[in-house]
């Protein structure tokens, strides 16, 4: 084994191993019938290891024009995890499989600075009606507790802050996420680098009218939210949840961690008996879900619906667009989050 270790320390491109090792034998296997033979030279090779190979010819640059993407397009997506196989078409909860995009050009303030944007509509049905009740969740009829990642532990609020499935029928604004003209005044923004057009949309804009109805309150951490500080309690099978505030900070806040650890069981119990609820508020569970997961971004002056962008990347091939979504969530009929496969768009008639 010492001889083997020494040879493994040789330069990577010239390693000589005993045949016994090549056959799966070690020093412990020699007594059980493994035969030794003269060393065999595996040769010298570095092909495929050097990333700076001179014989790799780069492909010609690929580009496209933003005007090639303008127009109205109708698409359907693959459901790679469908029960019937990966070729099945993804369907939204309504049963519709349609994803519609409408793209149009807009001129810039300087030459060569055209951009493209528009809107994207998922599924079927009408967009949600404007909100009227700030104390109920939104959109009306959407129960976030049915989502697989909703945490119904009665002692904790859900910690899922990822993207939500898109609201069917709502027109989300599409925009180019990056204004490349900020980096180079001479850059022709009419050109699509590598032929791939990337557009972004904010899935939480559908909540913005509802968020603007909310009253910002201190969240106990130096910021603001649409519900106050405290502990949040979810109930199973009931539309109402609750927020409670107690005096535990007053009781335990004056003690250091070391002092708390030094308390006897009797002393700790005596302190816990002093803890009492000083405030209790009944809340709609869906409103509580939206507020505690920061779907509304609140400041002292108000709240608005805003979050990280999802993106749709498109490539034009003939009369079709091929697209993929990223940083987006889609759910199946069992309210489980699933990845969405490639989307194929054709021009709307």
Image: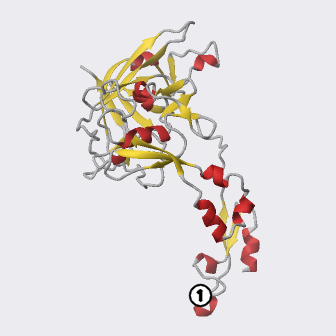
Residue 285 shows in the view: yes
Q: Tell me where residue 179 appears, x and y as whole percent.
A: 56, 20
Q: Residues within 10 Å of mark 1 (few under 14, many from 20)?
A: some
Q: Tell me where residue 9 appears, x and y as whole percent.
A: 75, 67
Rendering quarter of residue 127: top left
Q: Considering depth in this image, is 183 or 112 the residue closer to the camera?
A: 183
Identity of the residue drawn at 64% across and 82% down: 26
Q: How is the image coloured?
A: secondary structure
Q: Tell me where residue 346 appears, x and y as whole percent.
A: 30, 26
Look at mark 1 in the image and give the residue it sits on: 34
Q: Considering depth in this image, is 78 or 279 the residue closer to the camera?
A: 279
Q: Tell me where residue 49 appears, x and y as whole percent.
A: 64, 52
Identity of the residue drawn at 69% across and 70% down: 16
Give left or right: position of 97 versus 57: left
Identity of the residue drawn at 41% across and 49% down: 150
Question: Where 58 falls versus 20 (above or below)?
Answer: above
Give left or right: position of 14 versus 309: right
Question: Where 63 falls versus 340 (above or below)?
Answer: above
Rendering quarter of residue 261: bottom right
Residue 48 shows in the view: no
Give left or right: position of 274 versus 335: right
Give left or right: position of 245 versus 138: right
Q: Quadrant of the C terminus?
A: top left
Q: Quadrant of the N terminus?
A: bottom right
Q: Considering depth in this image, is 243 or 157 the residue closer to the camera?
A: 243
């Amino acid at each position: 084994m010492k001889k083997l270790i020494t040879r493994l320390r040789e330069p990577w491109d010239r390693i000589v191993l005993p045949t016994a090792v090549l056959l799966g034998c070690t020093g412990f296997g020699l007594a059980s019938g493994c035969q030794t033979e003269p060393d065999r030279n595996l040769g010298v090779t570095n092909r495929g290891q050097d990333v700076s190979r001179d014989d790799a010819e780069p492909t010609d640059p690929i580009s496209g024009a933003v005007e090639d993407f303008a127009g109205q397009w109708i698409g359907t997506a693959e459901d790679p995890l469908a029960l019937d196989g990966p070729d099945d078409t993804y369907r939204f909860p309504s049963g519709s499989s349609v994803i519609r995009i409408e793209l149009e050009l807009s001129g810039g303030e300087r030459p060569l600075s055209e951009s493209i944007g528009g809107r994207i509509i998922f599924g079927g049905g009408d967009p949600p009606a404007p909100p009227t009740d700030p104390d109920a969740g939104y959109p009306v009829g959407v129960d976030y507790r049915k989502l697989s990642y909703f945490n119904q532990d009665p002692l904790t609020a859900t910690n899922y802050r990822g993207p939500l499935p898109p609201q069917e029928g709502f027109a989300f604004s599409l925009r180019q996420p990056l204004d490349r003209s900020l980096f180079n005044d001479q850059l022709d923004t009419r050109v699509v680098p590598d032929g791939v057009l990337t557009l972004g949309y904010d899935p939480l804009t559908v909540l913005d009218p509802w968020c603007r109805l909310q009253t910002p309150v201190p969240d106990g951490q130096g910021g603001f939210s649409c519900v106050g500080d405290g502990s949040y309690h979810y109930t199973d099978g009931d539309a109402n949840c609750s927020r409670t505030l107690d005096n535990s900070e007053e009781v335990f806040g004056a003690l250091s961690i070391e002092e708390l650890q030094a308390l006897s069981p009797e002393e700790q119990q005596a302190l816990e008996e002093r803890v009492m609820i000083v405030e209790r508020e009944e809340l709609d569970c869906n409103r509580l879900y939206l507020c505690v997961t920061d779907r509304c971004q609140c400041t002292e002056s108000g709240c608005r619906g805003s979050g990280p962008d999802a993106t749709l990347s498109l490539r034009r091939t003939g009369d079709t667009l091929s697209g993929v979504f990223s940083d987006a969530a889609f759910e199946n009929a069992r309210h489980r989050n699933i990845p969405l496969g490639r989307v194929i768009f054709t021009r709307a008639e």
